[in-house]
Image (spheres, rainbow, N blue to C red):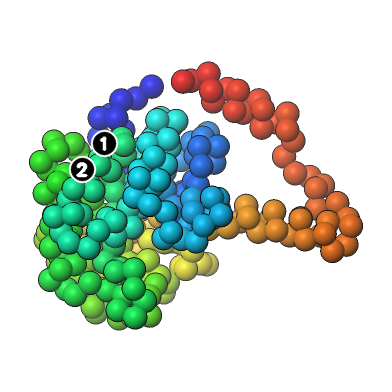
């Protein structure tokens, strides 16, 4: 079983060249299955985790989320990146305190957003957003842990689709110590290539929930280093469940069960996965 330090080193190396997909599990079972498919790293999903507990995205407490990261990190052998939302705090010093707690869960990376949580004023002002990233960087450096920091510009997700502003923020986040940069919600080739060029040589994460239609090879050719899917895999699972349950409730039919993975197959997979721990 790799150590936490091993996983953190591996995660940093993944960002140095090439392009990789980092899918987003929402519980230990989905994490283990994604690991079994050969993905080199995983990332948490705040929405997928919240929905699995019957809660809306953003409604979980800091401590609930930290416990989730710890469970995923301890169950898997590959690096885990934490979707640490806005750091569960507004002020930079409080963000730093929470980042230290996040590091202690065993994650290999974490991201900090510039979303305030208030849709009427969704983004922290520029200087405060940068100060929050700088505080997260300071907390990581002071911990001595080789944890990779991702800075996120959230305007495209919250009614502020201004690419120039997003690039300005990402450039400042990079100067403040972010190792990887991320604008969830961009989806065109022009947007993606503009972000990659603006923050080069720092690596860029692309969220494929919005940038549909591109292959991994095409995204790699644009210069993207890391591809995530956010809560989409969790929604795929929920969508299949909703459709099957709705057919039973409305039509009294069970034909949606045809061809699904068997209990025996899942038992065999998880029995083998469990032997590694």
Quarter residue 103 falls in: top left
- The residue tagged 2 is 100
Compared with 182, 17 (above or below) is: above
Q: Secondary structure at mark 2?
A: helix
Crowd band around label 1 with a 10 angstrom C-alpha radius: few (<14), some (14–19), many (20+): some
Marks 2,1: beta carbons within 8 A: yes
**Res 112 quadrant in image:** bottom left
Is residue 15 or residue 141 the one in the foreground? 141
Nearest the viewer among 226 and 45 is 45
Residue at point 36% right, 76% down?
119
Q: Where does the image place residue 247, in percent across and percent down from the top left?
A: 81, 60
Q: Residue visible at 40% across and 30% down? A: 74
* Crowd class of label 2 (few under 14; some 14 to 19; many from 20; radius 10 Å): some
Q: Position of residue 172 (x, y in %)?
A: 14, 66
Question: Residue 146 or 128: which is nearer the viewer?
Answer: 128
The residue that appears at 29% across and 56% down in the rendered structure is 88
**Could one spot residue 227 in this view of the protein?**
yes
- Above or below 175: residue 18: above
Looking at this rendering, what residue extends furthest in the right direction? 252
List the residue tagged with mark 1.
104
Looking at the image, residue 149 lies above or below residue 182: above
Residue 142, given in percent of the width and then of the height, sits at 10, 41
Q: Residue 248 in the image: x percent, y percent?
A: 83, 56
- Position of the N terminus by quadrant: top left
**On the rendered structure, is 147 left or right of 251?**
left
Q: Secondary structure at mark 1?
A: loop
Q: State left or right for residue 220 relative to residue 263.
A: left
What's the mark number on residue 80?
A: none
């Amino acid at each position: 079983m790799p150590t936490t330090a091993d996983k953190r080193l591996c995660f940093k190396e993944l960002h140095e060249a090439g392009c990789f997909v980092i899918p987003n599990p929402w519980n230990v079972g989905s994490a283990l299955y994604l690991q079994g498919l050969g993905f080199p790293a995983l990332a948490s999903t705040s929405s997928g985790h919240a929905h699995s507990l019957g809660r809306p995205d953003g409604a979980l407490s800091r401590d609930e989320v930290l416990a989730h990261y710890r469970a995923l990190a301890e169950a898997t052998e590959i690096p885990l990146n934490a979707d640490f939302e806005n750091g569960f705090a507004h002020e930079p010093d409080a963000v730093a305190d929470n980042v230290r707690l996040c590091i202690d869960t065993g994650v290999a990376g974490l991201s900090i957003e510039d979303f305030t949580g208030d849709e009427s004023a969704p983004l922290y002002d520029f200087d405060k957003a940068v100060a929050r990233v700088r505080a997260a960087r300071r907390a990581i450096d002071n911990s001595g842990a080789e944890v990779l920091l991702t800075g996120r510009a959230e305007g495209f997700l919250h009614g502020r689709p201004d690419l120039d502003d997003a690039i300005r923020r990402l450039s400042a986040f990079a100067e403040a110590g972010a190792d990887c940069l991320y604008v969830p919600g961009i989806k065109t080739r022009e947007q993606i290539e503009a972000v990659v060029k603006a923050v080069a040589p720092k690596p860029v994460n692309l969220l494929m929930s919005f940038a549909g239609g591109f292959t991994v090879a095409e995204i790699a050719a644009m210069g993207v280093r890391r591809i995530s899917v956010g809560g989409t895999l969790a929604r795929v699972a929920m969508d299949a469940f909703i459709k099957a349950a709705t057919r039973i409730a409305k039509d009294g039919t069970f034909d949606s069960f045809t061809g699904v993975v068997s209990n025996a197959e899942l038992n065999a997979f998880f029995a083998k996965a469990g032997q590694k721990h």
